Image (cartoon, helix red, strand yellow):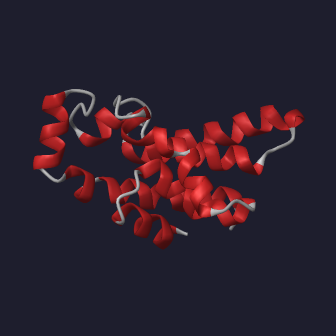
């Protein structure tokens, strides 16, 4: 699944799409639908620099795995565990912090593109998020 996520990211899909779509078959979901569901979450929520798309994509995946409305507290606990682990490994879950620039601004986006941050930094986050998600889902 990690390889699939990295492949999707290299094809130009955003980080959230790449993480979530890599797990789509496990949820009985086709890849095109998964790519649509996660499309607005890249760049920290539509390039707002907020919660990193890999975190959002993983949380969507965890939500798909817990479809019973009575399992909400369990979902929250598992999701919180994902967030805490990712944050402990990377220091933050915020796109702006992880990239070292604010992609919600023209200057920050320009810096990210000029320094090729999306291709040099983000793949590691895609990889880590899929590995953590795989462990949680036991896949």
Vertical placement of 4 versus 76: above or below?
below
Residue drawn at x 47%, y 57% is 18
Vertical placement of 49 versus 39: above or below?
above
Residue drawn at x 86%, y 34% is 69
Task: Using residue 57 as the reference point, say whether residue 67 is left or right of it.
Answer: right
Residue 46 x, y percent position in the rendering: 40, 34
Task: Using residue 101 as the reference point, say whether residue 57 is left or right of it.
Answer: right
Residue 123 x, y percent position in the rendering: 34, 59
Q: Quadrant of residue 132?
A: bottom right
| Quadrant placement of the N terminus | bottom right
The image shows a total of numbered marks equal to 0
Residue 96 x, y percent position in the rendering: 30, 33
Can residue 7 be seen here? The reply is yes
Task: Using residue 63 as the reference point, say whether residue 120 is left or right of it.
Answer: left
Residue drawn at x 66%, y 62% is 30
Q: Residue furthest bottom?
A: 3
Residue drawn at x 81%, y 44% is 67
| Quadrant placement of the C terminus | bottom right
């Amino acid at each position: 699944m990690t390889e699939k996520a990295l492949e999707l990211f290299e094809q130009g899909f955003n980080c959230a799409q790449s993480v979530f779509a890599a797990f789509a078959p496990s949820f009985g979901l086709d890849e095109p639908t998964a790519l649509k569901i996660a499309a607005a979450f890249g760049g920290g929520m539509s390039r707002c620099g907020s919660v990193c798309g890999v975190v959002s994509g993983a949380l969507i995946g965890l939500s798909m795995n817990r479809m019973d409305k009575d399992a909400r507290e369990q979902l929250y606990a598992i999701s919180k565990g994902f967030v805490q682990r990712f944050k402990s490994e990377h220091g933050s879950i915020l796109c702006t912090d992880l990239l070292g620039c604010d992609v919600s601004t023209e200057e920050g986006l320009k810096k990210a593109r000029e320094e090729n941050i999306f291709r040099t930094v983000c793949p590691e986050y895609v990889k880590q998020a899929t590995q953590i998600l795989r462990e949680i889902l036991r896949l």
